[in-house]
Amino acid sequence: MKQILFIFLIFIAFNSSAQKNDSLNLANCRQQTIQKYPLNKDFNHNIEVNNLKIQNIKTIYLPVLNLTGQVYHVADVPHYISNNPMLEIPQIGKDQYKIMLEARQVIYDGGLIKRQKAVEKSSLQVNNQSIETKLFSLNQQVNEIYFLILIFQEQQNLLKLTHKTLNEQLRVVSSGVKNGVLLPGDADVLKAQILKLEQSITELNAGKKNGLEILSQLMDTTFTEKINLKSPKLNKPDDEGKINRPEYQLMQYQQSNLDNVSKLNGVKRFPYFGAFGSFGYGYPGMNMLEDNAAIIYTFGLNLNWNIWDWNKNKREKQIFSVQSDMINTQREVFDKNLNIALSKEKNDIDKLSELLIND
């Protein structure tokens, strides 16, 4: 990239050709490449998946209904053998059955549903920001091919100008040869230079054409070979550009998501209240002293509270703490690499600017 910028800036210094209306600029190339890139579809995909997950979470507030049925045989049943003929207790059969409609309703979940929604929201932010980071990396591809095409374009302009100069010299030399002032060999030397120059122009045309084909694929469009690329204004990289890098926002979202997952893990230890009920028909009924089928129903409240988990929650908190440290380490590594890259770019631009001034 440094060599490309160096050659590009040198040729820009000698560029005297006017720019045509049919032209491109770097900013538009970047913008269109990102807009047309297929990965953009995943933004809507992530939102759609997130909405479906949120809808599933909300169903926890709704009653849960289950229909169950059983037909079974028991080894023994309660019975009583009385010696008093006046006291006969009927004995129920060992072949039994029942069909039940069971219902459960959440009354208090300890904040579980709220935390689950928060996790899904922060997960969506992480997923979409990951896409933003990948799309941002496309700028580097566009930059490289754009500057490469610019090099071909500026070399073409220089060689065409040289070609024009050599043709004028050939015309003068040919006139001198015709008048006997110069030798024919002088004209042959110029013709050979012109031929070599035309071959170089042909190679540059092919290089620019190939570059435009790659750029057109990135931008999902078509170009003519006559299209002109505008020279971008090159500024020194600054801290604002560093702050606006999407990687920083991604790491911030990752940290936020980790915090939400940690909070979700914490509320799992909270007490859970609910209501339950069942209604059905079966044999025997609730009265074990009656040898017939009957309607069966129950209802009530239930409490679930994990009062001891063998320090599982404590260890999971330690895991989240380590994962948080890993995100901070990633940020430090990214900071270090980015600062090195920015320093190199600043030094390269200073060096190239001095070269242009000297030229």
Image: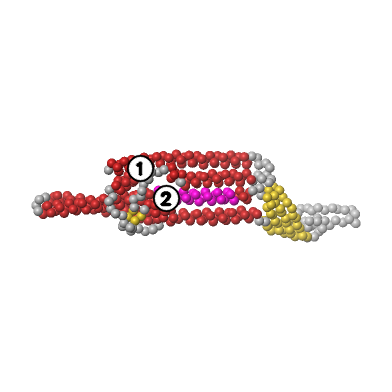
Residue at horizontal 14%, vertical 49%?
186
Residue at which label 2 appears: 138
Residue type at mark 2?
Leu
The main secondary structure of the magenta stretch is helix
Tell me the SS state at disc 2. helix
Instruction: Give the x, y percent position of residue 319.
Output: 57, 40
- The residue nearer to you, when weighing 217 against 252, is 252
In the image, the segment drawn in magenta is 117-141
- The residue nearer to you, when weighing 1 against 359, is 359
Mark 2, other Cα within 10 Å: few <14 / some 14–19 / many ≥20 = some
- The numbered mark, 2 or 1, whose residue comes first in the sequence reads 2
The label nearer to you, 2 versus 1, is 1
Instruction: Give the x, y percent position of residue 111.
Output: 64, 48
Mark 1, other Cα within 10 Å: few <14 / some 14–19 / many ≥20 = some
Residue at horizontal 81%, vertical 53%?
78
From this view, report whether residue 47 is shown above or below residue 9.
below
Instruction: Give the x, y percent position of residue 200.
Output: 25, 51
Direction from residue 126 to residue 268 in the image, left or right: right
Instruction: Give the x, y percent position of residue 30.
Output: 40, 52
Quadrant occupied by the C terminus: top left
For the residues labelled 2 and 1, the Cα–Cα distance comes to: 22 Å
